[in-house]
Image: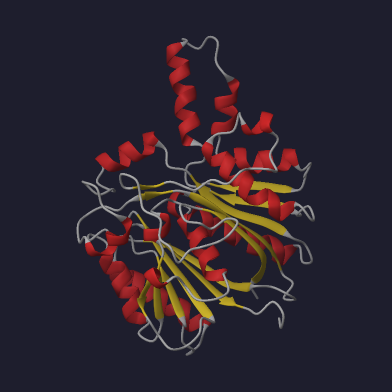
Amino acid sequence: MGIFIHKINCISPQQTWGDIDIQTLRAAEENRLYAREPVYDGIPPGILRRMGRAVRMGVGCALPLMKDSSPDGIIIGTSNGGMEDCIKFLNQIMDYEEGMLTPGNFVQSTANATAAQLGLMTANRNYNITHVHRGLAFENALLDAMMWLKENPGHNLLLEGLDEISNYNYNIDYLDGWYKDGNVQNKDLYATETKGTIAGEGAAAFIVNNNREQAIAEVKSVRTIHTNNEADLKSFLRRFLDEQISGEIIDVLVSGENGDSRYAHYYKAVEALLPDSMVVRYKHMFGEFGAGSALALWLACRQGAFPHHSIKRAMPHTAGSILIYNSYKEWQHGFILLKRMDPENS
């Protein structure tokens, strides 16, 4: 038995906050999709002023979900935490020769700063953990939530995935060939057929438990694998599907295809194994970043139709069972199997 999702929030480069409009595609800026941050009404100005971008997004995205009741645990996945503040602190060490350092940059730069701030601001002294596993950070956070709820039934958890665009990380990854040369519009991302992708950032938060009643989605299973062998990936997925759906079809494949021509064959291989599934893509909306699968889960959980610009292969059936597949920097592959539910009839 999986876990059930009851509430969702998302801060992203698209209009996913407030009056949500994901049918309109917002453009990238110099191959970067920056998050459209809302006004953070729930964060005191004195605290907000000291927050780095990643922490600000993570706390701002999660706090509204914690307003009605305090969760029994906070679990967060991030690939690098507040990297920009980390670099500021390291530069200060050099500039001031380890003298008059500003502690704020150090406090906000640790990977667990978001989970810690949420715990402090809400006086939540329950289970509090951050998973930092590059491209599988959110999948590992989700696995942790599933195991914790199996051991502690009848409780609620806050689950979140988040990352920021750090100039430091962007420059290193660009030099390493992970981002595209020249200015590429995100609406044309999948038609470029060149190496590299575009950078993104954002946060997606969920309230999860093991209570089916009034849930919006059920996460049935999560699987991860490290490989750069396409045959191994296909074999792994076949076994996973045989175990989980036993001959039933997957209605929708939410694909992490990112426009990098070098690794498109992984996504094509997965699509080929699911010939009867609708194929939906999301990285032209949110960009590439380690915890991007959290935003894919948010997109999959939303009721109603997927954005027209996200549909690669249409099918006549409705979205019931959904498989999210994401590959990060070739080696890390994650699968999340879920089912949309009708909250009024669940």
Going by the image, does 345 lie left or right of 256? right
How far across and down, in percent of the image, does residue 113 sit? 61, 37
Front-most of residues 69 and 290? 69
Name the residue located 74 percent from the left edge and 72 percent from the top edge: 211
Q: Is 26 placed above or below 37 here?
A: below
Is 127 on the left-hand or right-hand side of 103?
Answer: right
Quadrant where the C terminus lies?
bottom right
Q: Is residue 190 left or right of residue 235?
A: left
Residue 167, position in %: x, y? 38, 35
Residue found 73% across the figure and 75% down from its top: 214
- Please determine whether, in this image, residue 45 is positioned above or below residue 257: above
Counting from the top left corner in percent of width and height, residue 250 is at 46, 82
Residue 20, by quadrant, is bottom right
Residue 34, given in percent of the width and then of the height, sits at 43, 46
Q: Quadrant of the N terminus?
A: bottom right
Q: Is residue 205 left or right of residue 201?
A: right
